[in-house]
Amino acid sequence: MASQLTRSQPDNATAESGLPHTRNVTIYGAGAAGTILALELINAGYEGGIQLLDRRQHFYREQRWCFWGEAPEVLSSLSRRQWPEWEVVSSLGRRVHGSPSTPYQEVYAPDFYQWAHHRLQQHDNVSFRFGEDVETPSLNGAIQAGETLVDCTGYRETGSPSLWQSFLGWEVISERNVFPSDRATIMDHRAEGPGISFGYVLPTSTKRAFIELTCFHPEMQDATVLEPYLQRYIESHFGRVTRVERVEQGCLPMQVEQPHASLSSNYYCIGAGAGALRASSGYSFLAICQQAKAVAQRIHAGHGECWRRPGKYALLDQIFLRVLRSETEMATEIFDKLFGHAPTESLIRFLQDKSSLSDDFRIVMSLPKRPFLRALFSNAG
C-alpha cells in the first residue's frame, strides 16, 4: 500500500558519507517516540535523511498522554489542556492537590500528530512511509554503513509483568453540569472492577469529560469485561450521559525489568516498550521525550549518553508492585495515605522521576509500614 505522506529521499552523497550528522536515520514506528525523535533531530540541525515507517496509514486513533509540569521544549508550541487541581477520591475522603508550577497536562494524540507531521513536512530531509507492512528491524541483521536504525515499535520480552494495567475510557457528554472543569480526578476508588480498579476523569467542560476505568490485575482484562463496570461508575456518580463520542482502550505491562535504549552505536530501541514506561504508574510520556532527545543528540553528535531512569525507581517500583499484588485489599488505604500524607511537590517529583532522597523519604514515610517491610524483606530474600 502506498504511503500517504511522501518525500523524495536524500541524495546518495549524504547517505554514503557516514558522518554522525549526515547518516540516514530510519525510524520504525511513528508513534509518540518515533515522531518526537524526528522532531528532536530536526531541532538539533540534523542534516542526514530521516525516514519514518509505520503500518498505520492514519493517526487519528483516540489517545492522550498526560504528565505533570512543563511540557518538553520540543512541544512548547503545541496546544495542551491543563488542570490546576487534581484529586484522589475514595470512601475515606477526597484528597485535592494543586500546584501552579506543575499543573496536570494532557497532549491529545490526534492534535499532536497533525501538528508534528505539518512541522516535519517542511524539511526536505524527512520522508514518510505510512500504510505499509513494515518489518521490525533485527539487531542481528546487517546495518549498512552510514545508516542508523531506531526501533519504536513496541515491547520487548523481558519476563512476565507483575501486574497488567488494563483500561477502557469514553469521552462523554452530559446534559447537566456535572464535571468540575478545573480539576482532574487521577484515581477514584469508588469505581468497581477486577483486581484493583479506579476511575479516572479528565473534564474539558462542566458537561464534557473523558472518563476511564483502569484496573491493576495479574491478567490482561478485555474491554468487554471492563465496559459494564465503566458504565456503572459513570451512572452512579455522574448520571446518564447523552452520548459517547470517543473510545480508548489498552493494556500496559507493569514491569520493572526493561531493556536499555542503546543496543549498539547505530541501533536503538526507544519508547514505552524500551524503558520509558514507569512500572508502578503507567506514565511514560515525559520519559519518552527525554529518551528521544538524548538519542537524537547522540545520533547528531556521534557521542553522548542515552537517557535511563535512575536505578532507585526500579527497586521502589518492584516493592510497590509486590505489595499491590500480595495485599490487594489494602490498595485503597495505600493510595489514600500516599496522596493524603505525602507533600504535593515531593509526590509530583517522584512521579516525574526527579525526586531527591528527602522526597523519597517523605513518600516512604507516608505509606503504611508493615506491608512494605514484608515486601522489602521478601524482595531481599
Image (cartoon, helix red, strand yellow):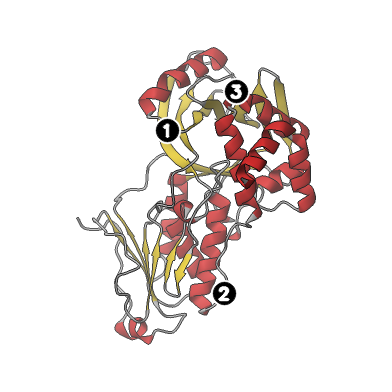
Residue 132, percent across and down? 24, 56
Helix, strand or loop at mark 1: loop
| 182 over 295 or under it: above or below | above
Q: Is residue 48 left or right of residue 256?
A: left
Name the residue furthest left. 1
| Dot label at residue 179 | none
Q: Is residue 234 left or right of residue 136?
A: right
Choose top left, top right, bottom left or bottom right for residue 219.
Answer: top left
Crowding around mark 2 (Cα neighbors within 10 Å: few <14, some 14 to 19, many 20+) is: few
Q: Earlier in the sequence, mark 1 or mark 3?
A: 1
Residue type indicated by callout 2 = Gly
Residue type indicated by callout 3 = Glu
Please name the residue shown 61% across and 34% down the image: 323
Which residue bears the numbered disc 1?
A: 219
Q: Separation of disc 1 and disc 3 at Cα?
A: 17 Å
Cβ atoms at labels 2 and 1 below 8 Å apart = no
Which residue bears the numbered disc 3?
A: 329
Residue type indicated by callout 1 = Glu
Crowding around mark 3 (Cα neighbors within 10 Å: few <14, some 14 to 19, many 20+) is: few
Residue 137, percent across and down? 32, 64
The quadrant in which the N terminus is found is bottom left
Q: Separation of disc 2 and disc 3 at Cα?
A: 46 Å
Helix, strand or loop at mark 3: helix
> As rendered, which of 272 and 16 lies closer to the eye?
272
Q: Separation of disc 2 and disc 1 at Cα?
A: 39 Å
Q: Earlier in the sequence, mark 2 or mark 1?
A: 1
Cβ atoms at labels 1 and 3 below 8 Å apart = no
